[in-house]
Amino acid sequence: MNEVIKCIKERRSIRKYLKKQIEEDKLNEILEASIYAPNAGGRQSALIVVSQDEKVNEILGKINRGSFYESVPKNAKLGVSKEQPSIADDINIKSAFYGAPTVITLFAPNNYLYTDGDCAVVAQNIMIAAHSLGIGSCMVGRADKTFEGEYGKDILKKWRVEEGYAPTYHIALGYYDCELPKGKERKEGRIKRVY
């Protein structure tokens, strides 16, 4: 099997991380791969912010987790993974970043039609590149909610994120403190070929 396709098929969301920080050369490889993601109109407008500040990541992860519980209906049936419980599975998990030593936040221009798509493919490149280097990742939504409060707004200023950019996704990155989880069976009938 082609190595790229193998990497895509084997990559899993990781929610248990070692404290060990990612080496600079590996992080740079991941970031380099991120800027080669496809983008609408060749604009290359996604902004990629890397935080390795343990305290900031922990606080932002807790804020993000809180926004999850505010947005989920009380009777929702969740259940992401028994092997790798998420905040949807276990209310005792306090951070949506799961203790990852590196968190990347993706931003894109406000009111741009292709913001979400552009950032999603950047996230995919980050996660596939990370997996190819033996580094785990987990994509986390609700980035907009993470920065709504005063703390989040202060962090955006400290990070010098330009006005007019909206947060779209977070990607938790780090070496996994677990076995690589088994993948779920792929659902049948999701591909339709028309002639």
Image (cartoon, rainbow, N blue to C red):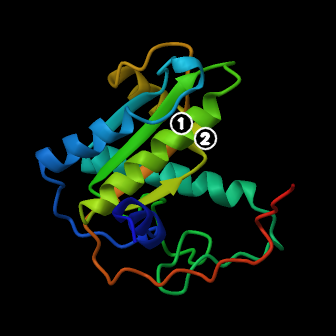
Q: Is residue 134 found left or right of 44 in the rendered image?
A: left
Point 33% across, 44% down: residue: 56
Q: Position of residue 184 (x, y in %)?
A: 59, 81
Q: Quadrant of residue 75?
A: bottom right
Residue 14 image point, x, y percent: 41, 69
Q: Quadrant of the N terminus?
A: bottom left
- The residue lying toward the viewer, choosing from 9 and 155, is 9
Dot 1: few (<14), some (14–19), or many (≥20) neighbours within 10 Å? many
**Callout 2, which amino acid?**
Lys
- Residue that appears at 42% across and 58% down: 97
**Residue occupied by mark 1:** 119
Residue drawn at (51%, 13%) of the image: 163
Earlier in the chain: of badge 1 and badge 2, it is 1
Front residue of this view, candidates 171 and 64: 171
Q: Secondary structure at mark 2?
A: helix
Look at label 1 and name its amino acid: Cys
Q: Residue at x 76, y 65 (%)?
A: 191
The answer to whether the residue labelled 1 contacts the one labelled 2, judged by CB atoms less than 8 Å apart, is no
Q: Position of residue 7 (x, y in %)?
A: 39, 65
Mark 1–mark 2 Cα distance, whole angstroms, equals 16 Å
Q: Is residue 157 left or right of residue 46?
A: left
Residue sticking out furthest to the right: 195
Q: Which residue is mark 2?
A: 145
Q: Quadrant of the C terminus?
A: bottom right
* Percent of width and height locating residue 46: 48, 27
The one of 146 and 15 positioned closer to us in this rendering = 15
